[in-house]
Amino acid sequence: MNDLIESFFNLFFIPKVSKILSEIINFGAICGIVTYTFKFIINLYLKRKNNLNLVPYYTDTILKAAKKKYIRTKCQNIDPSNEIEFENNFAFAVREDLLNFFLKNVFRIKQPEQKYYLILGDAGMGKTTFLLNLFRLYNNNLLNLIFSNEKMKLLPLGENFDELQKVISDIKDPEKTILLLDALDESNLFFHEETKNYSIFFDKLISLVSNFKQVVITCRTNFFINEKEEPYELKIKKYNTTGNGFHIIKKVYISPFNNSDVKKYLNNTFPFWQIENKNKAKKIILSTKDIFFRPMLLSYIEDLVKLNKSNFIKFEVYEALIEAWIDRESLKYPEAEKLIFKTNLYLFTYELAIHIYENYKENGYFISFENSQKIALKNNINLNELEIRSRTLLNRNSNGDYKFSHKTILECLLAYFSFLTRKNIGVNQYQIFYNLENFDFAQNLVEELHLNYKQFFKLPNIYEIDDFASEHASKVIKEKYKNSKPTIVWENGMTYRIHLQDLS
């Protein structure tokens, strides 16, 4: 190239001048290329920074926290809540990587016929974390930054509806924008419109976002009364697409973790030099069946390990998880209302456990939504319809019936009630108020509580039992068992006896 430029100038100038001129041009070209490249990189950086801006709804800290220890979300087309325990779900559901589903398939379609997606999952299944990571990965993709003029926006539906409506309306080029809407169940649009008709409510929201290229919405499964109430066909007519009629919304359910996911999470949480803590975490997880298949609950495993208890009993794990769950739900309320909500939620949880226990032989471990409302009304529990459906420790199956998110939570509560109300009816013989014949895990927890002299609890005590008397009884039992190896033998579902093996 340099020789070509120099040859051209030789036609008009002496060789020495031609060489100088060609070098000046080459230097200018190099400077121009460097300047252009620098500007290109700066513009790319600014574009990325602007695209990743989630203020005022999410901070950089929240985005980084969502990335840390993230295990890729899986999805399925069968509601996992239809099974009593998560592990039963894996035999029938086909799991798919949800990030790949959107990033490698859905978002690559230039003129998508399928515009609307609804991601359903129970509390603590990682819906918000998934959207934050989807948003992060899409906007960090170099090919998207360089070649695409499309953008992605993420908004929480729990914000004031009037303000949110203005924000959505002000988004430029909606036809080139992918819109992510988090937490439909937290939207005050439902109450803002003063309607209990789900189709009307959902159509109003969809009409607001109908001009966007694609819309992805997350929601708690419990928000809808049953699977039939979950939206399917929308009142948005198709244009410029194959086929006739109206748009439909594609539903997918977030899959619970499996053993492989839990293992990956532990590896991300505890590096190789924390092998002791990792082993403690494994021990805790093994003691609780598959309750840690719910990502939100698994996120507390590090806190449980940090308690540094050598004799961590299973009941204390469940107690900590129930407390953390209710604390998390209370964060959605102003400071002055948190304690009131928590008190009502604890009381509702207790009464629900008792009702399911009293009726499980006829109804299984499920309760209808109508009966759950009656329980709240009967016991003067101040929880509204939405709070009962989506703030409690309940899951909803496809038929619209509810159950505890995990059967062992029910058994934990029954064990707690049984232990608090136990009576000494003979020498080393005790009777409880609840019949645990068909609740072997609850029996196991009662044994733990008794043999570990448990006297102080984080869970509220609804029974009028004197703390001093409880502490005194615990000390007496501990002294009594000092030189013995006590074991518990169940005589029936309501009576157990302490067998003492002399170690002296």
Image (cartoon, rainbow, N blue to C red):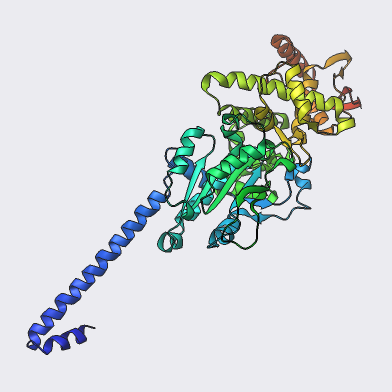
**Residue plotted at (58% across, 31% down):** 193
Using residue 56 as the reference point, say whether residue 359 is left or right of it: right
Image location of residue 374, percent across then percent down = 77, 22
Image quadrant in which you'd find residue 369: top right
The answer to whether 454 is drawn above or below residue 14 in the figure is above
**Residue plotted at (61% across, 47% down):** 265
Image location of residue 434, percent across then percent down = 85, 22
Quadrant containing the C terminus is top right
**Residue plotted at (64% across, 47% down):** 234
The residue nearer to you, when weighing 256 against 251, is 251
Using residue 313 as the reference point, say whether residue 67 is left or right of it: left
View extreme (right): residue: 491
The answer to whether 25 is drawn above or below residue 11 in the figure is above
**Residue 72 can be seen in this image:** no
Using residue 167 as the reference point, say whether residue 253 is left or right of it: right
Image location of residue 299, percent across then percent down = 60, 39
The residue nearer to you, when weighing 309 against 269, is 269
**Residue 162 can be seen in this image:** yes
Quadrant containing the N terminus is bottom left
How many labels, in total? 0
Using residue 75 as the reference point, say whether residue 25 is left or right of it: left
The residue nearer to you, when weighing 279 against 28, is 28
The residue nearer to you, when weighing 471 against 199, is 199
